Amino acid sequence: MTSKYSIVTADLTVKALQDSGYKSTAHAIAELIDNGIEAEADLVELFVVESTERPSQWARHRVEKIGVLDNGKGMDDELLRNSLRFGVGTRQNRKGIGRFGVGLPNSSISQCNRVDVWSWTNGPDNAYHTYLDLGELRNGRAEVPKPEKEKLPDEWQEISEGLGETGTFVLWTQLERVQWRGSKATLDNTESLIGRLYRRLITQGIQIRLVPMRGSEVLLGARDARPNDPLYLMAPSSTPPPFNQKPMFRPYGGGNTGEIGVEKFMVKGVDGNDYPVLIRSSISTESARRPDIAGEEWPKEVSPSLQPGSTPWGKHAAKNLGISLMRADRELDVDTRWTNSYDPVERWWGIEIDFPPQLDEVFGVTNNKQSATIFSSLATFDWEEEADGMSYEEFRDTLRAEGDHRLPLIEIVYHIREKLISKLQSDLKDQTRGTGASRKRHEKVATKADEAVRRRKEEAPPSYTDTLGAQTSVEESKQQQYESLVNTHKYSPADAERIIEETWSNDRRVQLLTSRNPDSSAFFNVEYIPRLLQVALNMDHPVYDDLIAVLDQDLDGATREELAERLESAASAFKLLLMSWARFEDEQPEKPRKRAWQMRQDWGRIASEFLRADDEEDD
């Protein structure tokens, strides 16, 4: 019994064990799957059993039991008893998935008031059985009950498809904290996580069978968990068609391992030895985001006008947003702190950090294997702020001289932020330039500008492009535009031809497009093509990111708060733009300043005419 003067009461101990930090029921179930895999099982079966009765006509059947059965090597009575002790465990090592010795009791108590375990090494009829019951713990039970010989109940033997001569069965009852009602909802939500955590092991031959039940009856929908790869390089996978049978992404970057998209860093563990950390990266294929890629058929049931993020596979990718942390071929977490969740483009790249258990202390792996706290804390690390004016190389040398234990991880973070994410984001913007919602908005603006240009032609002398047009054939003008789009602005030949066709079929006099021009300080550039004034927004200028891109982002799925934040950001950028012009005038000598003043007046007058076209259309 608990002493009258115990520092910690039994109730408080039980409450602390229940609040052990599992993110979800699926994460707690994963601990049981870990145990099976560590026991060399090649089949793990997950049974989710809902009640046969409902509280009322309108209520859903509620989950009342969860069982996990594996065909691993099983445990004798001594190992079985120790497996339910906190902090003891049976496989505390530095090689496999496990290590911490708390998975079975911790995960179980986080979800239920009673856990029963059967394990056998000589057939399920010769199993040993023991249990933990929170009611008994509250009443002062201090030891795990001695295992007794007790055959695995017939009901579980009959429904298992992989029952072996050795194995273990864990059964949760008196469920308290299961998140979802019904076996289907529980398995659907669990499958996504299980498929992601064990994606590599599944492709290596581990089978994880998901079985919905009502009472003793197996319901429709039993299946094997499919890989869910946030890098979208695996096939087959759980990604919606057509990317369930082919990769949706491709490896990204050169790497230093001889494998495309894989970079290796050597990191010293607490034992003084160096261990490899592999950084894998991937980027969406164009066919996942565009319906007009030659040779890549867009699914007939998915509208080609749909925003890529709104496609079934785009929604799937949104759930895998972040950097995947892999330890011993098993994922710990997908860390979203490295991404901007407001930007739908973020879902179209993947990064995976793969490290061995020998680096657990360096990365800060938690005892429930759900995160790497030290590494994740560096998601918001700003080396420039800490460097206090030093270059990165100087800062790195300073940390090395000081023996800063964070240095290996900081170097990995620098590579991810400076060499990967920024480049991925840039390349993804280029991938869909001139398509989707931004293309339609550009076309709408260009149409209104055309109206203003035609009106100006009636009131003003011929412009430079008008004069060039009178001296040049249409074919020559098209060729000049094609060379500009392909050579200067780096559009694909197919996109260039589409833009040219739209320009001339609509008899357009103004064309708006986006371009990469990191060497230019201008935030837009003007090209004088015969009969066409071509305006290119410089995507490498801060004005584009802070003003244009903020407003051109997809609206699908955006909350009111996100939209308000975008508008506030764009308004601030526009005001700063005006202030920068004012400062430009202020810095000029007297004559250029007067000329700048006159240019501002003239530009304002023409701007009012262009914007008037917008007002007239609204009327």
Image: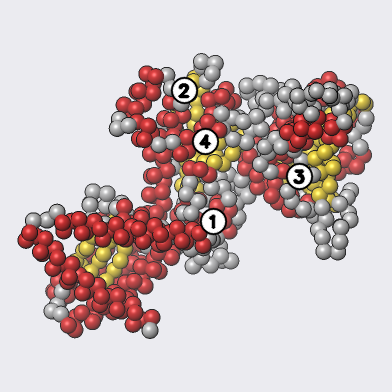
Which amino acid type corresponds to the residue marked 2 in the rendered image? His
Whole-angstrom CA distance, mark 1 to mark 3, is: 31 Å
Residue at 14% x, 71% y: name it. 464
Q: Give residue 248's mark.
A: none
Which residue in the structure is indicated by mark 2?
A: 405
For the residues bearing labels 4 and 2, Cβ distance under 8 angstroms: no
Amino acid type, residue under disc 3 in the picture: Arg
Of marks 4 and 1, the one in the foreground? 4
Rendered-image quadrant of the C terminus: bottom left
Point out the tag, 4 or 2, that comes first from the N-terminus: 4
Q: Are marks 3 and 2 in contact (CB under 8 Å)?
A: no
Residue at label 4?
376
Circle 1 crowding by C-alpha within 10 Å: few under 14, some 14–19, many from 20? many
Earlier-in-chain disc, 4 versus 1: 1
Indicate the amino acid at tag 1: Gly
Which residue in the structure is indicated by mark 1?
Answer: 314
Which mark is in front, 2 or 1?
A: 2
Look at the numbered discs 4 and 1 and tell me whether their residues touch, using CB distance below 8 Å: no
* Spatial separation of the CA atoms under disc 3 and disc 4: 27 Å
